[in-house]
Image (cartoon, rainbow, N blue to C red):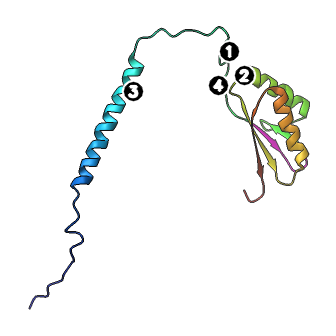
Amino acid sequence: MAVKIDKGTALTSLSITPLIDIVFLLLIFFLVATRFAEEDRELDVMLPSASEAKPLVVKPKELFINIDQHGNYFVGGTQITLDEMEQSLKQSALNNPLSQSAIIRADKRCAWDHVVGAIDVCHRAGIHDVRPTIKGDDD
């Protein structure tokens, strides 16, 4: 004799027709939105030039300023003083006046005076996008 198992009615009442409708509507929406974005770029327009615009001299990259536990500063793998770092940062800020950024990576055992000194040098050099981070042995 065969055993009949009742599987319930939960899955039989679930209709995926509305789900398919929504997927097709989203597909149409993204196709139309993509087409409008392409048309905006295809217009032949002569753009004005700004007289005070500063050209991008060098592709901007983040400057990494490392500070060890003794308060020594390292930029580009070489140890430098605060005065040398200021000259280097001023040159970088002149090359990229609006987009130069600096990341200060300090050992967690160093005094905050060294971190504040590096931030101060960055601001004097004209770099205002400064992000200090503290690195320890477990990072």
Q: Residues within 10 Å of mark 3 (few under 14, many from 20)?
A: few
The relative height of residue 131 versus residue 135 in the rendered view (above or below) is above
Instruction: Tell me the tag on residue 54.
Output: 1
Q: CA distance from mark 3 to mark 2?
A: 31 Å
Give the quadrant of the C terminus.
bottom right
Instruction: Tell me the tag on residue 95.
Output: none
Kindly identify the residue that appears in the image at 10 percent across and 88 percent down: 2
Give the quadrant of the N terminus.
bottom left
Q: Residue furthest bottom?
A: 1
Relative horizontal placement of residue 129, taking residue 122 as reference (left or right): left
The picture quadrant where one finds residue 45 is top left
Q: Residues within 10 Å of mark 2 (few under 14, many from 20)?
A: some
Q: Residue 14, percent across and down? A: 23, 64
User: From the viewer's perspective, is the residue at label 3 or at label 2 nearer?
Assistant: 3
Instruction: Tell me the tag on residue 59.
Output: 4
The relative height of residue 122 versus residue 54 in the rendered view (above or below) is below
Instruction: Tell me the tag on residue 97.
Output: 2
| Disc nearer the start of the sequence (3/4) | 3
Magenta segment includes 70 = yes
| Disc nearer the start of the sequence (1/2) | 1
| Disc nearer the start of the sequence (4/1) | 1
Relative horizontal placement of residue 71, taking residue 60 as reference (left or right): right
Q: Residues within 10 Å of mark 4 (few under 14, many from 20)?
A: few
- For the magenta stretch, what is the residue range? 64-71
Kindly identify the residue that appears in the image at 70 percent across and 34 percent down: 62
**Labelled pair 1, 2 in contact (Cβ < 8 Å):** yes
Q: CA distance from mark 3 to mark 4?
A: 27 Å
